[in-house]
């Protein structure tokens, strides 16, 4: 790229509000999806208008008022160990860790912070700023706890401490940087920066408990009129100005900006601000339309951020309903609370797709209980009554079209199998380079996982979990896929089987990736096709949550092999190559359960074993790499779901248009697939 072209691109990016450095960042900043065009807003004409009664406007729920003892006990802890309000704004919270290992630090003094594992001490400004963030977090939590104690007891000692915290923030806020982000950019260039923190997300989440704390205490004689004016003008109004400086549209960050702004509107009695939160571009109604699919799932394709955005909407709806806005009536909001159920494994756990964690549906329970305050839903009633496994073990195969996920399910009870094929949108900054990834749960456990996100403080967040090599999919020339969206080709159910196929044409230049799954009660047939514009290395990677990966039969010793030192491959070690023609393998778990593999094999195919990283850095996932050096390849794998259910497998001589025969349970299945569908016969 010439300097002139680079300069032109930079000018164009700045004109659209996107800093050029954002293009090279893999940090978890939730950037808006440039493909989504948002309206300028919707009108509140003819709809209920915000109404503000006398304070307190954000009352404590009745059931909490009955827990006076617990409220006073929590508040007493903050009186015994008073909040230290830092002199200065905070940094990025994930920087409070050893940058080499990702281990969280412990304060040894205000200026010295130690890695408890290695003993290293950090005194740099980045660490100190992250520590100030922790102090700000504690002040927010303390203020609300103390305000609740004042509300249930009337004792001045609790209210005085709330007043001290809020006045300090009001005094300091005007002196914080105009705008600063965690990369050190300032002012115009710190587009996603803030003032009290280096990201506006923290300002938004933090202002909610502070607004509630002030709302509960401000009518007391603890404050003078001048102090109330200062707190409202120099802290709450100034924070609103910070949150309104830019709009992130579909982002989960914007969801929290909206909730924070609604809390500020309640404090200030600002009807115009409350209306703006509901109707503006990126506001509550627009986000339900644009950020939530018709299947009820958040657009970033991760349950963790689905629940994160959902919590913000819950906070906003709680506030809006108190101000006379019937925000709970929106159909897509209601769908958000049942949507994760469709993704669940039979045991109630959830796949860790994109930047998510290995969660279970229990993480959704507080949301279900909240939703039942506003509407009755039979499914939520069943889930709350529990156990959730009674619901998830009986789920049917399904397609979640907006999320881009097809889930094949067979069997019942402990023998239930669920196979996931991910073909959907990349997911923005929280997406992974993993199109056509396969996740497999069978016979009581997850076998083929998605690695999730570890944590943002670990270097492996960038160097492993986001990479193509960390997933059960195709990598070309040991390089990551591009951010891409695939397409579902077909989804069908027949006598004793369920099938689906999907393809992607944008993961690599000029390359077609296609995957077909045919699931029965005893086995899964997985066929992967690759057609590239030129010869290269084509890898099909399979990772398992297991103790070991073993070949079946007598073999010669494998030879060490060197993999790439980039794009996740640097974490696949040690690697060994096995002789050609070794077509039977098995993953063996700690409990002795097995997942068998029958491989189609070919003269051009190499078999490489290694180990990747699981849900934490110490967990190793045995890995099989099927490698071809070619312009095109077809890999067919028959997964024996119990390790001994399949009696025989016969692969066609020509895998491109042949029939795979699988004998299991005395039945021989003849299976052929192409982009029009699966043809299955059982005799």
Image (cartoon, rainbow, N blue to C red):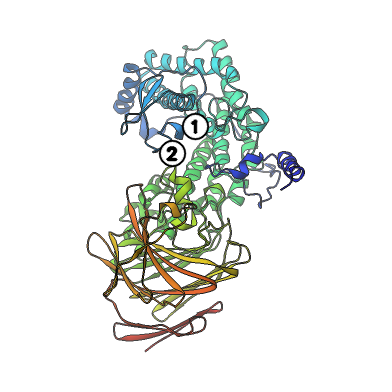
Point out the image quarter for the C terminus: bottom left
Relative vertical location of residue 201 with respect to residue 670 in this rendering, above or below: above
Q: Is residue 52 visible?
A: no
- x, y percentage for residue 69? 29, 26
Q: Residue at x 43, y 59 (%)?
A: 343
Q: Residue at x 66, y 49 (%)?
A: 34
Who is closer to the viewer here, 507 or 75?
A: 507
Question: Which residue is label 1 attached to?
Answer: 92
Which secondary structure, mark 2? loop
- x, y percentage for residue 460? 43, 46
- x, y percentage for residue 442? 33, 66
Q: Is residue 359 visible?
A: yes
Q: Residues within 10 Å of mark 2 (few under 14, many from 20)?
A: many
Residue 16 located left or right of residue 621: right
Q: Name which quarter of the figure residue 554 lies in.
A: bottom left
- On residue 457, the disc is 2
Who is closer to the viewer here, 165 or 639?
A: 639
Q: Name which quarter of the figure residue 327 lies in.
A: top right
- On residue 144, the disc is none
> What is the CA distance from the residue labelled 1 to the residue labelled 2?
10 Å
- Disc number lying in front (1 or 2): 2
Q: Name which quarter of the figure residue 606 lies in.
A: bottom left
Residue 565 located left or right of residue 35: left
Who is closer to the viewer here, 408 or 647?
A: 647
Determine contact: label 1, label 2, CB under 8 Å. Answer: no
Q: Earlier along the polypeptide chain: callout 1 or callout 2?
A: 1
């Amino acid at each position: 790229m010439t300097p002139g072209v680079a300069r032109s691109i930079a000018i164009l990016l700045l004109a659209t509000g996107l800093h050029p450095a954002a293009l090279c960042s893999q940090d978890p900043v939730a950037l808006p999806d440039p493909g989504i065009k948002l309206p300028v807003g919707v009108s509140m004409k003819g709809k209920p208008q915000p109404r503000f009664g006398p304070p307190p406007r954000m009352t404590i729920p009745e059931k909490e008022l009955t827990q006076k003892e617990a409220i006073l006990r929590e508040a007493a802890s903050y009186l015994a160990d008073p909040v230290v309000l830092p002199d200065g704004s905070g940094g990025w919270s994930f920087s409070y860790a050893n940058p080499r290992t990702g281990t969280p630090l412990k304060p040894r003094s205000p200026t010295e912070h130690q890695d408890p594992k290695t003993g290293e001490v950090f005194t740099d400004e980045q660490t100190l700023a992250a520590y100030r963030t922790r102090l700000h977090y504690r002040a927010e939590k303390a203020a609300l706890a103390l305000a609740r104690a004042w509300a249930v007891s009337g004792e001045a000692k609790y209210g005085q401490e709330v007043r001290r915290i809020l006045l300090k923030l009001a005094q300091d806020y005007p002196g914080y940087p105009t705008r600063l982000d965690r990369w050190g950019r300032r002012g115009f260039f710190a587009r996603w920066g803030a003032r009290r923190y280096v990201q506006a997300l923290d300002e938004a989440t933090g202002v909610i408990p502070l607004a509630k704390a002030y709302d509960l205490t401000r009518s007391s004689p603890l404050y003078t009129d001048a102090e109330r004016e200062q707190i409202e003008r120099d802290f709450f109004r100034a924070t609103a100005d910070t949150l309104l400086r830019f709009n992130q549209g579909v982002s989960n960050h914007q969801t929290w900006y909206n909730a924070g702004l609604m809390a500020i509107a309640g404090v200030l009695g600002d009807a115009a601000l409350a209306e703006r939160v509901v109707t503006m571009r990126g506001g509550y109604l627009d986000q339900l339309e644009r950020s939530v699919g018709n299947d009820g799932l958040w657009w970033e394709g991760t349950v963790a951020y689905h629940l994160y955005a959902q919590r913000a909407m819950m906070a906003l709806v709680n506030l809006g309903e108190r101000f006379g806005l019937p925000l709970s009536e929106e159909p897509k909001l209601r769908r958000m609370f049942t949507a994760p159920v469709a993704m669940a494994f039979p045991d109630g756990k959830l796949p860790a797709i994109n930047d998510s964690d290995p969660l279970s549906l229990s993480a959704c329970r507080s949301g279900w209980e909240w939703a039942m305050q506003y509407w009755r839903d039979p499914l939520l009633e069943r889930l709350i009554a529990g156990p959730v496994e009674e619901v998830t073990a009986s789920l049917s195969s399904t397609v979640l079209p907006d999320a881009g996920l097809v889930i094949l399910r067979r069997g019942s009870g402990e023998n239930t199998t669920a196979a996931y094929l991910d073909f959907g949108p990349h997911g923005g900054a929280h997406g992974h380079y993993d199109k056509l990834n396969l996740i497999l749960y069978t016979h009581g456990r997850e076998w083929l996982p998605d690695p999730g996100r570890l944590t943002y403080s670990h270097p492996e967040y960038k160097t492993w979990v986001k990479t193509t090599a960390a997933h059960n999919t195709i990598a070309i020339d040991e390089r990551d896929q591009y951010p891409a969206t695939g397409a579902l080709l077909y989804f069908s159910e027949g006598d004793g089987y369920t099938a689906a196929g999907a393809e992607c044409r944008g993961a690599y230049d000029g390359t077609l990736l296609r995957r077909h799954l045919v699931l029965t009660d005893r086995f899964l047939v997985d066929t992967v096709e690759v057609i590239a514009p030129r010869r290269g290395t084509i890898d099909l990677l399979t990772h398992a949550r297991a103790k070991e990966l073993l070949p079946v039969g007598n073999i010669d010793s494998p030879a060490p092999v060197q993999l790439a030192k980039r794009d996740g491959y640097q974490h696949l070690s040690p690697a060994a190559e096995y002789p050609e023609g070794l077509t039977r393998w098995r993953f063996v778990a700690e409990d002795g359960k097995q997942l068998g593999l029958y491989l189609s094999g070919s003269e051009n195919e190499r078999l490489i074993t290694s180990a990747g990283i699981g849900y934490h850095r110490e967990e190793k996932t045995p890995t099989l790499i099927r490698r071809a050096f070619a312009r095109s390849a077809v890999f067919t794998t028959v997964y024996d779901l119990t390790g001994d259910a399949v009696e025989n497998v016969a692969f066609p001589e020509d895998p491109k248009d042949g029939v795979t025969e699988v004998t299991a349970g005395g039945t021989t299945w003849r299976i052929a697939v192409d982009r029009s569908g699966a043809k299955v016969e059982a005799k």
